[in-house]
Image (cartoon, rainbow, N blue to C red):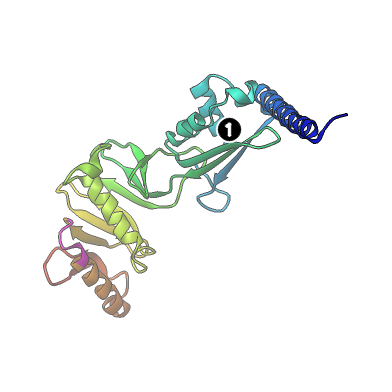
Amino acid sequence: MLNNDHLKTLKRLGIIAFFFLVAALVISAVNEKKASAANEVLIDIEQLEVGRSMINSEDVLLVLENAFGYNLTAVPIGGLDVERIERVLRADAFVKDATVYIDAQNKIHIELTQRQPILRIIDKNGLTYYLDQDGGKVPTSRHYTPRVLVATGNIPPYDRDYLEKKKHVIKDLYELTQRILKDKFLEPMIEQIYLTQDGDFQLIPKIGDQKIILGKMDRLEEKILYLKNFYKEALPYKGWQKYKTINLTFKGQVVAKKK
C-alpha cells in the first residue's frame, strides 16, 4: 500500500509529465506552423486621398519578389524574415513606414504608409519628381498624380544632401512650400513657384495671371505679411485682373504694376 509520501511523489511526477507533454505538443505545433507555407498576402496601403495611391498591391509584391527572389507564399513561415521584409519596404521610394506580421491563419499582413508629396519639381533639365513632407525625394507614379504645388524654372538637379547644406535652391523651395502650406490664406491661393535665371522666386496664384515677385528668401515673413495685406485691402477695390506684377522685393512696401 502506498503511503502519503509515495502518493505525493507520484502526483509531482504526473504533473511534470503533463507539462512535458504539453510542451512537446506546443513545440510540435510551432514546428508544424513554421514548416507550413503562408496561404495569402494581405496588403493594406494608407491612401493619400480617397481612393488614390501612388503605389498598389502589385507594386508591393513585385518589390518583395525582386528583393527576395521568390513569392512570399512559396516558402515556409519559418523561413520568412519579417524584419527584413519591413526594411525592404521602407527602402522603397513611395513608402514612409511598413508593418508586417503573420496571423494565426498563416496570412501575411502588410500595412504601408505612403510618403505624402507636398511639392512637384520640374528642374531645368526637365526631370520631374516630388518632395514629401520630410523633404525626401518621391518619384512620379503611373497610378496617381497628386495635386500639389509645382516648382519650375532654373532649378538644379536633385541633391540628396540638400537639407544638410547651409544654402541650397531645393532647400529654399522646400522651406517656402512648407511656409505656404501652413498659411490658411496662401495655401488655397498659390499654384506655382517659379525660379528665374537670377535666382529670384516668383509665386503664381490660382486666380488671375499676375506674377508675385518674392525675390530671395530674405525677409520672408515680412514679404508674406505685405502680400496678404495687399490682397485683402487693395485687390477688392481694383480687381484681380488689374495688375501684371506684385513686387515684394522692396523693403517696407509693395510695388504693383498694372497691365
Q: Is residue 155 visible?
A: no
Indicate the position of residue 43 as horizontal and vertical percent values: 60, 39
Residue at the limit of the structure toward the top, as seen here: 69
* Residue 99 counted in the magenta span: no
| Residue at 37% from the left image edge and 50% from the top image edge | 133
Kindly identify the amino acid type of the residue bearing the numbered disc 1. Glu
| Residue at 20% from the left image edge and 60% from the top image edge | 214
* Residue 218 counted in the magenta span: yes
Assign a secondary structure to mark 1. Answer: helix
Q: Is residue 214 left or right of residue 102?
A: left
Indicate the position of residue 51 as horizontal and vertical percent values: 58, 50
Q: Camera-side residue: 84 or 246?
A: 84
Quarter of the C terminus within the rendering: bottom left
Q: Is residue 235 left or right of residue 9?
A: left
| Residue at 44% from the left image edge and 52% from the top image edge | 147
Among the 4 quarters of the image, the one containing residue 21: top right
Residue at the limit of the structure toward the right, as seen here: 1
Q: Is residue 203 left or right of residue 191?
A: left
| Residue at 25% from the left image edge and 75% from the top image edge | 229
Q: Main secondary structure of the magenta part?
A: loop
The boundaries of the magenta stretch are 217-221
Q: Residues within 10 Å of mark 1 (few under 14, many from 20)?
A: few
Indicate the position of residue 7 as horizontal and vertical percent values: 80, 33
Q: Camera-side residue: 188 or 92?
A: 92
Quarter of the N terminus within the rendering: top right
Indicate the position of residue 129 as horizontal and vertical percent values: 36, 40
Q: Is residue 172 visible?
A: yes
